[in-house]
Amino acid sequence: MPFEFERACKLARRGELVAAQAREVLRDIMKRADIGETLQSATIPAHFDGWLASKRARKSAATGERYGQAVNAFLKTLGKRASLPLTSLTTRDVENFLDARTAEDLSPDTLSLDVKIIGGALNVARRQGLIPINPAEAVELPEAESAERGTFTPAEVAMLVDAPEGGTGKRMFSKRTFHSLRHTSNSEMANNGVSAEVRMGVTGHKSVREHQKYTQLEMDTRRAAVRKIPSLA
């Protein structure tokens, strides 16, 4: 045993020690120590597959699918490196993934979520002792966009409906999100005299305070309300 260890040290000093040789020495140490454990190792796809299976068993189907999309995209950007041991991952690998996703014209929020998903899987690996550090922690996330609370015009809604299914991934209306559609439908109902109680039933809002955030009254509606005030003359 001392001879094998000394030989490994000499190879390391000359820069000739490969991972397989080092792991073999460690395995032999653990075997001689009779601690009943083996040296843990995992490939990149094996770890992410196991992590995904665990998440899909505990999360909703939609969440599991979202995690799967990020993991598949990450493994794709790794190319041939995807078959390497988990310990081979570097911060540069995660940055390359972020760069590739950025090139798809995705929103900053989506990009941040992608990196956080990968980082979450690597955090599990770190806690399990499979990697010494999480390479995703050093990646700088993009600044989040401030979503516009404005509503869509009828013409814009028509453009969304007529847009080809799948599209190109490009966002037609800048920072406005799905929630802007909720703003639009709720505000249209409010401006056409639908009561708050009915609107809350449609939108699913549980509190008036939250519901008010999604209600934008047009100026004509405000003027009509003012005209209902009895004249003081």
Image (tube, helix red, strand yellow):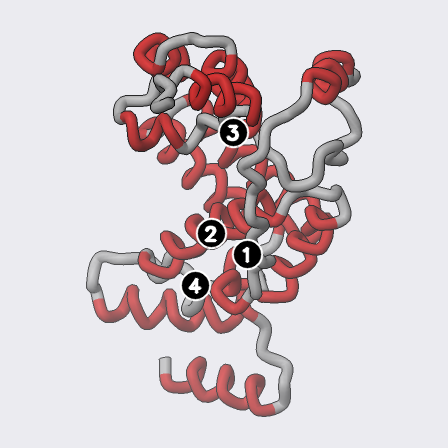
Of callouts 1 and 2, which one flags the residue occurring earlier in the amino acid sequence?
Answer: 2
Helix, strand or loop at label 4? It is loop
Choose between 19 and 106: the one closer to the eye.
Answer: 106
Q: Is residue 172 left or right of residue 32?
A: right
Type of amino acid at the residue the image marks with label 4: Ile
Type of amino acid at the residue the image marks with label 3: His
Q: Residue at (33%, 31%) from the top-left corner?
A: 210
Of callouts 3 and 1, which one flags the residue occurring earlier in the amino acid sequence?
Answer: 1
The residue indicated by pointer 2 is 42
The residue indicated by pointer 1 is 85
Q: Quadrant of residue 199?
A: top left
Q: Residue at (73%, 14%) from the top-left corner?
A: 158
Q: Residue at (55%, 56%) from the top-left corner?
A: 85
The residue indicated by pointer 4 is 131
The reply to whether the C-beta atoms of the residues labelled 1 and 2 are less than 8 Å apart is yes
Q: CA distance from mark 4 to mark 1?
A: 10 Å
Q: Quadrant of residue 195?
A: top left
